[in-house]
């Protein structure tokens, strides 16, 4: 048995902050104790956490490695993307296995296993994407829930690609109500958006800034409202992904205050970037094309407020990186052909810590949003997202005073730009452990492809 002791740190969880030492035996946490009690512990490895926070490893519940979109693929593979995640203190990702239209959900899951297995540096799990709901797919949902894939994403956007109509959504929600799965929803009115896209292009409006204009906040709010009503009819829980607009937040808040199992997620891009970035000259705005789109700055106040009140419960990245050169440029003459997505799996934990420094959230809420709640939401807690005996030893020794400047020159994501280029932030992961193994330490990467394991998940831990 290998033993590691982390000494002298401030242990921060979603519920408390304690000066304590942590004992790791093999892959799991064995004990947490005050320094006076822990001083007699012996170990093969001692990590000095003096002046550092000790937090559970980040859980990013929304990534898209190697995702096909618009004739190309997301630039990060499972190897490069999970390595970048590790550098940023994220030790678990949940990616999306896409059902090919006209084929089985099982085929999508098997394809994603082929991409990820033996390639990941950190532990990983899958959601399923439902692209073509029918009787067979509904039965497949039951089988996959039994295999630990307990959440399924649907799209009210992208007609002809991922889009599901209200009848398909209702049937999937009814199935989830029976089998305990959680339906995740991309809530935008894709039919109306396509009309506005065509009108914009016919008027000669081809620049990236029009991506934000045609995807109106009210079309996000309308779809969010509709998804909530369908979930009420079906009697199933709902998780709305990448919430960006004040009006959509209001719909989620109302449903939650009425006691329904409705949950919301937002992403760093909506908290730190704005529609002004979409209007950057010389086609630079293409770097910031994602869906839902970036919003005017005034929307950010409602997002931060909702994060503090738990009307938004999770901050994930929606990491879907496309290089500016050769990929984003596919839409140089037509904004609707710009691949949708922003890189961020490496920067999430640091950006949220910078929000702690700025006073937007507390340290415990930082841990809750980035680790504990996504682990509970998607059936991984207390194995993940916790510092407690028996939990996986996914731990980050975090330097709260470190200064860094985010840049494509120094990040480890496989993409040629950083959406936060030049942003100076405070805080950085110094040492990262995944299941007890140090995979990043003092600027040295020690991980390897294939050490990450596939995680079978339980049902959502928040259902009432």
Image (cartoon, rainbow, N blue to C red):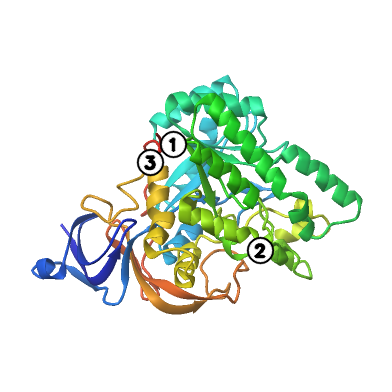
Q: How far from the left and from the top, in percent, is residue 412? A: 51, 68
In front: 20, or 90?
A: 20
Foreground disc of the pair 1, 3: 3
Structural crowding at the residue carrying mark 3, measured as other residues with C-alpha within 10 Å and reported as few (<14), some (14–19) or many (≥20): many
Question: What is the CA distance from the residue labelled 3 to the residue labelled 2?
Answer: 34 Å
Q: Which residue is mark 2?
A: 297
The quadrant of the picture occupied by the C terminus is: top left
Q: Tell which circle, 3 or 2, labels the residue nearer the N-terminal end.
A: 2
* Image point (52%, 49%), residue name: 265
In front: 340, or 273?
A: 273
Confirm whether residue 68 shows in the render.
yes
Label 3 sits on a secondary structure element that is loop
Q: Which residue is mark 3?
A: 379
In front: 240, or 150?
A: 240
Q: How far from the left and from the top, in percent, is residue 153? A: 55, 38
Question: What is the CA distance from the residue labelled 1 to the residue labelled 3?
Answer: 10 Å
* Image point (73%, 65%), residue name: 285
Q: Tell which circle, 1 or 3, labels the residue nearer the N-terminal end.
A: 1
Label 1 sits on a secondary structure element that is loop
Q: Which residue is mark 1?
A: 149
């Amino acid at each position: 048995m290998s033993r590691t002791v982390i000494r002298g740190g401030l242990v921060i969880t979603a519920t408390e902050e304690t000066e304590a030492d942590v004992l790791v035996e093999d892959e799991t946490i064995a004990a947490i104790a005050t320094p006076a009690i822990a001083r007699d512990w012996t170990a093969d490895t001692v990590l000095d956490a003096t002046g550092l926070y000790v937090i559970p490893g980040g859980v990013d519940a929304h990534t898209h490695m190697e995702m096909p979109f618009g004739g190309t693929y997301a630039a990060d593979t499972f190897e490069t993307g999970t390595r970048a995640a590790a550098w940023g203190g994220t030790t678990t990702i949940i990616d999306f296995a896409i059902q090919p239209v006209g084929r089985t959900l099982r085929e999508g899951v098997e394809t994603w296993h082929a991409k990820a297995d033996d390639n990941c540096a950190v532990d990983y799990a899958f959601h399923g994407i439902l692209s073509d709901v029918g009787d067979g797919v509904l039965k497949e949902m039951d089988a996959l829930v039994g295999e630990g894939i307990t959440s399924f994403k649907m799209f009210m956007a992208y007609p002809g690609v991922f889009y599901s109509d209200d009848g398909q959504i209702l049937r999937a929600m009814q199935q989830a109500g029976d089998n305990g799965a959680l339906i995740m929803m991309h809530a935008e009115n894709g039919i109306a958006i396509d009309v506005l896209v065509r009108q914009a292009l016919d008027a000669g409006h081809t620049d990236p800034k029009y991506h934000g204009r045609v995807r109106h906040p009210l079309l996000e709010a309308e779809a969010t409202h509709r998804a909530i009503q369908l979930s009420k009819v079906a009697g199933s829980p709902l998780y709305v992904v990448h919430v960006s607009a004040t009006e959509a937040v209001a719909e989620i808040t109302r449903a939650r205050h009425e006691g329904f199992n409705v949950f919301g997620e937002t992403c760093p891009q909506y908290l730190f970037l704005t529609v002004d970035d979409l209007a950057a000259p010389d086609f630079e705005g293409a770097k910031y094309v994602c869906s839902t789109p970036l919003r005017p700055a005034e929307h950010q106040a409602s997002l931060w407020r909702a994060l503090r009140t738990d009307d938004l419960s999770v901050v994930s990245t929606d990491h879907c990186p496309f290089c500016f050169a050769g990929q984003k440029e596919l839409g140089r003459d037509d904004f609707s052909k710009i691949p949708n997505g922003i890189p961020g799996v490496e920067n999430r934990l640091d950006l949220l810590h910078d929000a702690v420094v700025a006073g937007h959230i507390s340290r415990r809420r930082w841990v809750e949003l980035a680790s504990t709640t996504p682990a509970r939401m998607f059936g991984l807690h207390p194995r993940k997202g916790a510092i407690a005996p028996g939990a996986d030893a996914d731990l980050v020794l975090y330097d709260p005073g470190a200064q860094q400047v985010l840049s494509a020159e120094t990040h480890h994501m496989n993409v040629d730009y950083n959406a936060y280029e030049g942003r100076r932030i405070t805080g950085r992961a110094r040492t990262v452990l995944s299941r007890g193994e140090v995979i990043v330490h003092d600027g040295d990467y020690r991980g390897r492809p294939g050490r990450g394991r596939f995680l079978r998940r339980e049902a959502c831990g928040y259902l009432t």
